[in-house]
Image: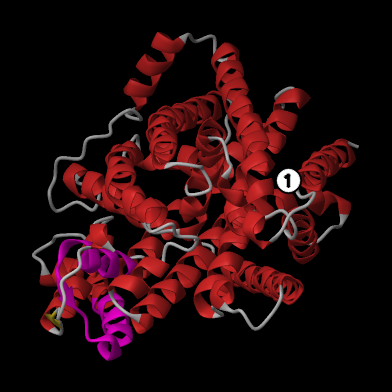
């Protein structure tokens, strides 16, 4: 009976999203799909971006890491916080000055057509893998704890969820997502706070008592001082900063929402407000993780990692309203990342690969039909990736996500860095090969790091190493510009 009620809640939630999509997509066109007609409110974008950045991965996987790694992840979060300032005051001014719809157009104007296409393809690869990893995790939880008892398979769940996401994104695009993300972020944060407060109450702990109990178990340690360790604090902070620059500042999904704000000043307000809020939200997720492990220990629950939060919320005898809060929070956490990614990938492919914005030989109706085909095709690609991740699931996907980002965003970071910080021209014919060589070298290094580097273990700084190799290769193969134009003057 509970499974039927929970499924009904999920379907009702989708009905609300569809209603918002119907309202916001009235009189929509390609411009509203791609950048929301540059009329989004900065505070609305800032709040909605919290849900996009946290995702179902944070909701489930981050609390699950506390048992084995303590607050290690907060070192990365501090790095994220620093990285958002670089995005706000280095990258956003460039995007607004150039009036970009796709941020990768910068690479075309500064470095050339091949660099532009290469950067776009690396974004498409990166965002596809990242978004489907997040979506897979939530579908797995829904299937295991809600739908399995009703005889509904993982495969059918994946198909239905992607179909529902298509329904509310295919017309409105960014214009719709700014509003749906706001709704979903609200529900996710409310669910997080309710779960924290209730578990503290059930353990008869206040905030100080919770912190003391977590300290006694070793859960609150977050400074790793061993330089050879993969979680050494400088590695984590630097890695986190560059992950933010790459996964936010050089990511069409995240920047598409930022540049939908009418002016640079408001967009920067959005970014700074967002980064402070995200710092607090991630700390609460780690606090929740410590509470979950304390609750599990007190009640003889053996689940760990990604299974911890779902097991306690769904199967531990907690009141049904906590189960409902968890489910709504989970669903709210996953869809801001999945719907935004689908829209951003459609935008990037249409603008960067197909050149839709500059095509004058086809009308708006034909462009809309093409956009719809691309949108549906990416949904199919998402489905294939989800099935693939089901086969390789290792039980803690947040670390997998950071490793994937290290390999795929490195070349993109190198291309933008070369364009912004040098006054040289690349040899465009070499760019695709350089962008493939650097991740391959990093993969080989990662497999042999302890052996080759005297026990040193590569962690989140993998992204920096990857970008550094690509940057050096770009520099070695570069030539002097015939006519120097810095990024700011383009």
Count of number-bearing discs: 1
Position of 87 with respect to 348 (left or right) is left
Position of 289 with respect to 68 (left or right) is right
Picture layout, residue 446 above or below residue 317 = below
Q: Residue furthest bottom?
A: 429
Start-end of magenta stretch: 412-441
> Closer to the camera, 112 or 247?
112
Q: Position of residue 159 (x, y in %)?
A: 77, 64
Position of 310 with respect to 158 (left or right) is left
Residue 428 quadrant:
bottom left
Q: Which residue is mark 1?
A: 145
Residue 6 quadrant:
top right
Q: Position of residue 218 (x, y in %)?
A: 32, 29
Question: Can residue 371 be seen by looking at this rendering?
Answer: yes
Mark 1, other Cα within 10 Å: few <14 / some 14–19 / many ≥20: some
Q: Position of residue 150 (x, y in %)?
A: 87, 51
């Amino acid at each position: 009976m509970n499974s039927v009620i929970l499924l009904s809640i999920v379907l009702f939630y989708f009905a609300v999203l569809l209603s918002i999509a119907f309202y916001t997509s009235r009189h929509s066109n390609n411009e509203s799909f791609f950048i929301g007609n540059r009329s989004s409110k900065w505070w609305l974008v800032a709040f909605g971006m919290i849900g996009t950045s946290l995702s179902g991965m944070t909701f489930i996987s981050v609390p699950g890491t506390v048992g084995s790694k303590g607050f290690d992840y907060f070192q990365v979060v501090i790095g994220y916080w620093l990285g958002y300032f670089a995005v706000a005051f280095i990258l956003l001014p460039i995007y607004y000055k150039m009036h970009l719809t796709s941020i990768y157009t910068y690479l075309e104007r500064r470095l050339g057509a091949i660099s532009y296409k290469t950067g776009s393809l690396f974004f498409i690869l990166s965002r596809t893998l990242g978004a489907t990893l997040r979506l897979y995790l939530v579908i797995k939880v829904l299937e295991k704890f809600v739908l399995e008892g009703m005889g509904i398979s993982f495969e059918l769940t994946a198909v239905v969820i992607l179909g529902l996401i298509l329904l509310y994104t295919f017309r409105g695009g960014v214009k719709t997502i700014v509003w749906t993300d706001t709704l979903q972020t609200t529900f996710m944060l409310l669910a997080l706070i309710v779960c924290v407060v209730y578990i503290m109450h059930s353990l008869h702990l206040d905030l100080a008592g919770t912190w003391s109990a977590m300290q006694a178990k070793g859960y609150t340690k977050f400074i790793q001082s061993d330089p050879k360790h993969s979680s050494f604090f400088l590695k984590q902070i630097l890695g986190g900063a560059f992950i933010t620059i790459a996964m936010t500042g050089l990511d069409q999904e995240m920047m598409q929402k930022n540049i939908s704000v009418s002016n640079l000043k408001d967009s920067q307000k959005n970014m700074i407000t967002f980064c402070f809020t995200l710092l607090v939200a991630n700390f609460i997720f780690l606090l929740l993780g410590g509470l979950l492990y304390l609750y599990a220990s007190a009640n003889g629950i053996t689940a760990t990692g990604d299974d911890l939060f779902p097991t306690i919320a769904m199967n531990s005898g907690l009141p049904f309203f906590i189960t409902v809060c968890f489910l709504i929070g989970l669903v709210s956490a996953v869809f801001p990342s999945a719907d935004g990614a689908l829209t951003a990938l459609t935008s990037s492919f249409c603008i960067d690969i197909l050149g839709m914005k500059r095509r004058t030989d086809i009308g708006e109706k034909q462009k809309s039909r093409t956009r719809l085909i691309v949108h549906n095709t990416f949904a199919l690609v998402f489905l294939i990736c989800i099935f693939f991740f089901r086969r390789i699931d290792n039980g803690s996907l947040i670390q997998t996500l950071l490793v994937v980002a290290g390999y795929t965003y490195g070349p993109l970071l190198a291309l933008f860095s070369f364009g912004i910080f040098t006054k040289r021209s690349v040899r465009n014919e070499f760019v695709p090969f350089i962008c493939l060589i650097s991740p391959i070298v990093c993969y080989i290094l990662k497999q042999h790091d302890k052996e080759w580097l005297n026990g040193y273990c590569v962690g989140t700084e993998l992204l920096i190493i990857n970008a550094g190799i690509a940057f050096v290769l770009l520099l070695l193969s570069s030539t002097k510009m015939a006519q120097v134009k810095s990024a700011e003057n383009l």
